[in-house]
Image (cartoon, grey):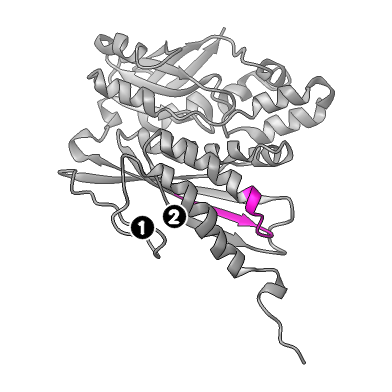
Amino acid sequence: MSKLTYKESGVDTKAAAALVTDVFGDLRRRTEQKRKLFGAFGLFAAAYDLSDYKEPVIVTGCDGVGTKLELLIHHDMLENAGKDLVAMSVNDVLTTGGDPILFLDYIGIGRIDKSQITRLIEGMTEWLAACDCILAGGETAEMPGIVPDGLIELSGFAIGAVEKKDLLNPERVEVGDVLVGYPSDGFHANGWSLVRRVLKEYASEFSDEEIRGLLAPTRLYHEEVRALKEAGADIRAMAHITGGGLTENLERFLGTRGADIQIPEWTLGAIPKVIAHCDAQGIIDTFNMGWGWVAIVPPADKAKALAAGPGAREIGVITAEHGVRVKVG
């Protein structure tokens, strides 16, 4: 009687090992330009030397791509999924004032597909190289019977560091401070359960080209943050506008204070056609409404903040009244 093998159960460990050597290793090298791992890549854990920092504080972020991934797979835009995965976590690290240093990914798939995984990693490494963050490792799990064919699970983990004296403290936000918004490139990777429902129920209103436009990857805001620092702006706080929109993402650190925000109508691509089918307050509480990043600075530094990125705009002011109030139009 023959004995069963792991491969016959649907898991090919040799194929997975070859993938790490042939694909992951080659692509990740492009993320080690300005920063290098301390020690070899491919060990059980990755190391990074923090001795260039005087009093380093470690900052971390973890996120995924959410239900947007279903449409990215369907429209064969896997590189964008890799970019989304990186930006969702790296942007969170940037809000602390820290430098994104290391990134790790988790890919769960029914059967190893070298082409699919290569394209995911290509997207990751493009965004990571852009912000000088090293792809330090990860996990590719082949799980037949658990992850259905045609689907992929994705998670990303970012690790950064910041000098203790430079760690942003949102408690410094004062009444009268200015909120400067930096444009998003679309819905990013939040609110897609609502977007997907609109696209399903009103499918005849959207062309394939319009849907692909909606699937633009989450924007990285490392250049805006770098420009703010180089300009010497007194950054009181920064917010990555993800699930919950401007209201929730700002309220989480404003405490008893609040903000009055005025933003224009969101006119990018086919977005107006999507939000026209959604509740008016619901879109404010769900989407970034065209502003994926917000920096809070004192009025004296408003000009510096506005010059830190294309399309930057003063969108509001900090108030003594609790709660974030958003007006559109």
Q: Are marks 2 and 1 in contact (CB under 8 Å)?
A: yes
- Could you tell me which residue is drawn at 60 percent across and 28 percent down? 216
Q: Is residue 74 left or right of residue 184?
A: right
Q: Is residue 135 left or right of residue 302?
A: right
Q: Is residue 111 magenta?
A: yes
Q: Residue furthest bottom?
A: 1
The type of residue carrying mark 1 is Ala
Quadrant in the picture for residue 303 = top left
Classify 219 as above or below 161: above
- Could you tell me which residue is drawn at 54 percent across and 46 percent down? 121
Viewer-proximal residue among 320 and 189: 189
Q: Is residue 225 magenta?
A: no
- Could you tell me which residue is drawn at 18 percent across and 44 percent down? 52
Q: Which residue is mark 1?
A: 46
Quadrant where the N terminus lies?
bottom right
Counting from the top left corner in percent of width and height, residue 200 is at: 79, 31
Q: Measure how far apart labels 2 and 1 are at the Cα level.
A: 7 Å
Viewer-proximal residue among 44 and 228: 44
Counting from the top left corner in percent of width and height, residue 5 is at: 68, 79
Classify 140 as above or below 270: below
Q: Residue furthest left?
A: 54
Q: Which residues are magenta?
A: 104-116
| First in residue order: circle 2 vs circle 1 | 1
